[in-house]
Image (tube, rainbow, N blue to C red):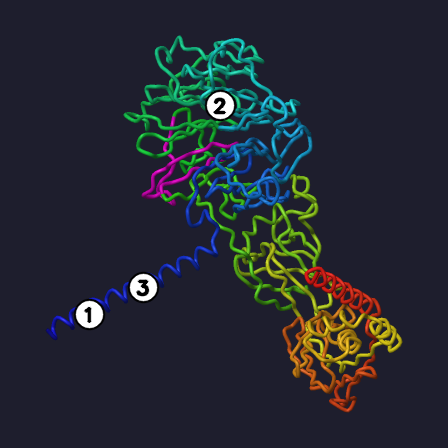
Amino acid sequence: MIQSSRSNFKGVLLVFIAVLVSIFMSVAYLQRASALEPWEVDGWSQIDAGNSYTCALSVGKVYCWGYNTDGQLGNNSTSNSAVPVAVDTSGVLAGKTVTAFSTGVSHSCVVASDNKAYCWGSNDVGQLGNNTTTNSSVPVAVDVSGDLAGKTILSISTGNQRTCVIASDNQAYCWGVLVLTPAAIDTSGVLAGKTIASISVGGSHSCVVASDNQAYCWGYNTDGQLGNNSTSNSAVPVAVDTSGVLAGKTIASISAGGSHSCVIASDNQAYCWGSSSLGQVGNNSTASSLVPVAVDTSGVLAGKTVLSIKTGSQRHTCAIASDNQVYCWGSNNIGQLGDSSTIGRLVPVAVDTSGVLAGKTVLSVSSGNLHTCGIASDNQAYCWGFNSSGQLGNNSVVDSSSPVKVIAFASPVVTSASFSSQNNRSILSVTGTNFPPYSLALTQSIVSVNGQALPFCTDGLGLTAQQFVDAGYSSAIVSDTPPCYLLIDGSGIIFTATSAKIWLADSFDITAEGTVSVNGSNIYTFNHVTPPVVIPAPPVVSVPPALVVAVTRVLDDIPEDIEDLIVSIFGDDKPISTIVQEFISNRPTFSGHANPFSTVVVTVHSDPVTCTTTADVTGYWSCTLLTGLPLGDHQVFVKVTTTDNQIVEAGPYKVTVRADTPATVDSNTKAEEVKTENTTFPWIWVSVGAGVLMLAVIIIAISRRRKAV
């Protein structure tokens, strides 16, 4: 029996410990999760590479990174970002989630949970669809007063300067290229009687898969990108040729690129047409094709089928095969094929999986202008190729010919700063954490001193500032003379993830207080001198006696039954004139001087009541109690908290409130520390207080009389 009890006790104890561990781990996870972006916890569900930027979707919210001159990141800014930033949701997207999105050359669009479309970015020819040609760095609503009236949106696709959607009537509507609001595409010809299953907008042409599972395209056709065995442009849809390799096949999906197009057919193989100047059609040729040709399967795609395909806006194409790996072909001058080389390929090659993609499969892929991105089996994003604007999302502007992981932004922090002399120069050395890569200095200023954004020094780089400018760099970010920050010297790289050196002008006062920050870090103050704390003055309050007398005389004329009512409300046997006089006159205003912008709290311990205020730029502060003090003596304390978090407490001060004279302060209290200041209670508040009180009395009296009747 004892043994059984012990066993039961151990069992209960083990369960209890397990529950505690579970709770601890859950709390720890929630605490960690609360500090992370949703995509860091739940990953990405969709990704799309644009011209020199990228966007991705996580938990109903879109994040973008890369080039942002036209506001295409949608974060109410035009500054580039080398890490994901959230698209603004304070305006038209407030309270909505995103279900689908698409990035174009310099604008992006989404379908939100209200089944409407919203766009942002470049709008020079109306590609945002809001009946304007004004760029927007935050989402704007697509116009629904015309052809889209009464319809909802099922899917969306953006291209160079155009946007198209499929609406709830299963028809396509497009805008852009000076068509400022959505307009229905022509269905009087080859699309007559058909609905639209999917749509893709390319550089200067668009394609759809219709309800008959065939492909149709329209737009520019100089390279045969419409696939109808012609080079004639077409303003209306034409059927893609099916007399050759597509004979007897249907179309599962389509992707329109810069000047070529690709599909996956019912045999689960890829077929492309149009320009192939750098092998982007994938048939081991650089000759353009006016009709579909089969993508080469003699190499890495041998024995594999194709699950998805995405054409780039320039000259490369990528696909996911049945082994759930990525294969690309075409132009590779910046490493956009991801095979750890910059060699162009006329046939598919495998994207490198020896690094961050090791052991992972790939769920989706998107080809941009000169870069490519995908989502892997860990639901994280990986990109490769051109990275001049941070479009790879790895907090860098260095190109990569193999995949790199999209990462969260780690905020820079400056922890110290010190002065030294080097080669007869004044140098400010700054240390901290998470400083950006020094290569970012080639696109923007990443150091500020005393609020001034500094250029980088050409010293040590072997070129003059003018040579950098001649090479296309902004004159605002490069300099031959101080003040500027150093990137390289004879010993190597100076600007690192934890340190930076700043070359100061000869006139810079190294003894004066100043500030420094690195790429949006905290503002670090060097040579900081803590100002002396000013002890506050004791409070004094006075009320104009004439006004109190005048109010009292008016109140003395109130009918006796109303006066009795007021007295019963206040629960006091005092005459009404005394009650009101005390209410008005016994709310002292305290004032004094302290350090500028200090927080001042005045506490009357005998009641107790407090008032809190902030000293102005001159150090003056003033606050008035919201409730009156009883007649008699009160102990008052004043607490000052400076902006440097220094705390000084003064008092007690003896404040005396009398019925017949203004309140006074015992000036001998702490007299050696403070200076007494006289203040006057504001007249307007006396008037307002009396008026409000009298109005309340009248309303209550009338109400009670009506009930009595």
How many numbered tags mark residues here? 3
Q: Is residue 99 visible?
A: yes
Report the amino acid beneath label 3. Val
**Of label 2 and label 3, which has the lower sequence position?**
3
Q: Which residue is mark 2?
A: 199
Q: Which residue is mark 1?
A: 10
Q: Quadrant of residue 447?
A: bottom right
- Image position of 547 (left or right of 534): right
> Mark 3: few, some, or many residues within 10 Å (few <14, many ≥20)?
few
- Tag 1, which secondary structure? helix
Residue 571: x and y in percent read 67, 76
Residue 62: x and y in percent read 51, 41
Look at the image and tell me in which quarter the N terminus lies. bottom left
Q: CA distance from mark 2 to mark 1?
A: 64 Å
Q: Is residue 593 visible?
A: no
Q: CA distance from mark 3 to mark 1?
A: 16 Å
Q: Residue at x 51, y 37 (%)?
A: 113
Q: Nearer the viewer, mark 2 or mark 3?
A: 3
- Tag 3, which secondary structure? helix
Find residue 33 and name its label: none
Q: Which range is magenta?
A: 348-377
Residue 235: x and y in percent read 58, 13
Q: Which residue is mark 3?
A: 21
**Of label 3 and label 1, which has the lower sequence position?**
1
| Magenta run includes residue 371 | yes
Report the amino acid beneath label 2. Ile
Q: Quadrant of residue 270?
A: top left
- Tag 2, which secondary structure? strand
Q: Residue at x 70, y 56 (%)?
A: 452
Q: Vertical placement of 664 versus 442: above or below?
A: below
- Tag 2 and tag 3, C-beta contact below 8 Å: no
Q: Vertical placement of 292 versus 628: above or below?
A: above
